[in-house]
Image (cartoon, grey):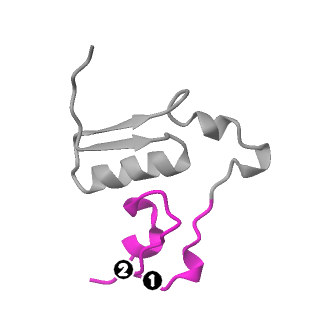
Amino acid sequence: MNTSSFDVVIVGAGAAGVGCGVVLRDLDVERFTLLDQHAVGASFQRWPEELRLLTPSFPSNAFGVLDLNAFGLSASRAFSLRCA
């Protein structure tokens, strides 16, 4: 039996679970795991063909504001383009 311990356990490795993992990496959290019924990202393969393209939704947000629909901090273009 594996006795690994984690600080965070993410249940579900679909779009939201993978996004949580990406953000945890951005926050330098190293001891986490993704649990899924199948394989990581398997739910993407079950999406209809029309949903294969994910586009940013930041036009509704002002520049420099975090896009809460982004799957990770670096995927939020408006947030990454913020002024210094």
Towards the viewer: 12 or 22: 12
Mark 2 Cα-neighbour bin, 10 Å: few <14, some 14–19, many ≥20: few
Q: Mark 2 — residue?
A: 82
Secondary structure beneath dot 1 equals: loop
Mark 1 Cα-neighbour bin, 10 Å: few <14, some 14–19, many ≥20: some
Q: Which residues are magenta?
A: 55-84
In percent of the image, x 50 and y 63: which residue is there?
Answer: 70
Which comes before the other along the chain, label 1 or label 2? 1
In percent of the image, x 54 and y 29: which residue is there?
Answer: 37
Horizontal and vertical percent position of residue 36? 49, 33
Per the picture, the main secondary structure of the magenta-coloured stretch is: loop
Q: Which quarter of the figure is the C terminus placed in?
A: bottom left
Towards the viewer: 3 or 25: 3
Q: Which quarter of the figure is the N terminus placed in?
A: top left
Q: Quadrant of residue 60?
A: bottom right
- Magenta segment includes 78: yes
Horizontal and vertical percent position of residue 30? 22, 43
